[in-house]
Image (tube, rainbow, N blue to C red):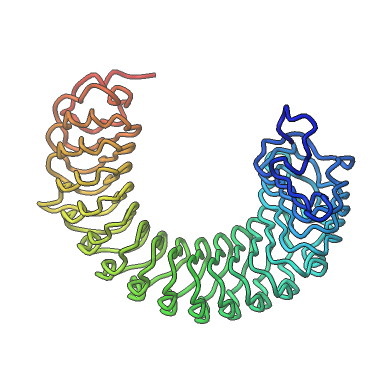
Amino acid sequence: SWKQGEGNVDCCTRDGVECSENNGHVIKLDLSNSCLQGSINSSSGLFNLIHLEWLNLAGNDFRYPEIPPEIANLSRLSYLNLSDSFFTGQIPSEILELSNLVSLDLSGNGYSGGFLELGKTSLTNLVQKLTNLETLNLGRVLIFNTPIPHNLGNLSSLRFLSLQNCLVQGGIPSSLGNLSMLIHLDLSSNQLSGEIPASIGNLGSLKELDLSTNELSGRLPTSIGNLSSLEKLDLSLNVFSGDMPAVIGNLSSLKALVLSKTNFSGDLPAFIGNLPSLEILDLSGNKISGELPDFFGNLPSLEELDLSGNQLSGDFSVSIGNLTSLKRLSLESCSFLGKLPPSVGNLTQLQWLGLASNSFSDSMGKIPTSIANLKGLQVLSVANNSLQGHLPSCLGNLTNMESLDLSNNRFSGQIPQQLVDLTFLEFFNDSHNNLTGPIPQGNQFPTFDNSSFDGNPGLCGKAFVKRM
């Protein structure tokens, strides 16, 4: 754990070690991400450091040992981080004797060698004993089909709480509304059910709220609009009902709003235009209908917009062309009509453009040449539309392209030879169009098999040699 070749150098001068200025005792040990391997057993000299106040062993590989009960020897610990270090088995009850703990992080352990389990050291007991906690991160620690205890709301100093992927079940206790200091709350990837309690609106300091991937239902409480400090709200993969509450428009500090696959319906709410700090908006996989409104022009900071898998229709909103910070735009599997506007070329930061499975068509339904402005584009999919006309040769200018899907449209003419300049291209599909002439040769094109060109009877060339 120490640097080699340093002889008998005073341990207090070693990397990651801090000693008391008064008596020289080791009080802080930070060996995080130090490539340590092998197990920590009960006889380890670590447990002789009885004056230790701060211990961080995160990000190492201890090869699936249990946490030794001798951890209780370190009774002065206020900070303990054993995250992402491949500990397994039951957390020893002796950890409850560390009554001075302010921060406890046991997250991200386990994997193929088993998981870390709270077991007999129940969450109820942990909360009763470790009353000074400001940070509690038990992400991926198995708590096995038990509810979140009501006494969790007694940790009045708590600022960070994560029970992500712990297999807790039941409802969210209203007592969590007592945690007025809480900044981060993550209860995602569990089996929580019922409605979100109205008391959630009491968490006025909250900046991040993640309740995604549960079985929560009912309507969102209007009190959620009281979370004026909130910067991230993720409620995806639940089964809520009704429209999105307009009070979300009160969350003027919001940077990320993720409500994908939450069963919401109705039109795109106008309140979204009142969120000027928004950087991520994901409303995919819902039952949202109507046309794209013009308020997107009010979101200058937006970097990711995903509205795919809804019932949206009408023309591609020209206002989206004002989102000049946009890096990802996903409008797949809706019912958009008409042409792709030239204003899409204004999105010069775009890396991902997904427009597949819509009804873009009509006499002008072709790829606009302004798309050549998107120099950073890595993924473009317009598959399963009714786009027509010739493929623009300017697609060859998009030299960062990794995936290009033009399949199942009505494109005609030849595949532009300029596409061989896309040297990063890993996936290409222009099958089921009306393309003719020779398939381009050179660079990536010989690596694409027949399925990339099927359904174009007029195509010819070496790509139709069957590859094994």
Instruction: Determine whether, in the image, residue 117 is placed left or right of residue 202.
Output: right
Residues 93 and 205: in front is 205
Q: Quadrant of the N terminus?
A: top right
Q: Residue at x 27, y 25 (%)?
A: 445
Horizontal side of 39 relative to 419 (left or right) equals: right
**Residue farthest toward the front in the current orientation of the protein:** 22
Residue 186 appears anywhere in the view: yes
**Residue 219: percent from the left, percent from the top?**
51, 76
Quadrant housing residue 201? bottom right
- What residue is drawn where x is 73% and y is 42%? 13
Kindly indicate the quadrant of the structure image that contains residue 265.
bottom left
Question: What is the total number of numbered labels drawn onto the structure image?
Answer: 0
- Residue shown at 16% from the left, 48% from the top: 370
Above or below residue 380? Residue 288 is: below
The x, y position of residue 326, in whole percent, is 32, 55
Query: Quick one: 335 or 280, which is closer to the camera?
Result: 280
Give the residue drawn at x 32%, y 72%. Answer: 273
Q: Position of residue 49 (x, y in %)?
A: 85, 48
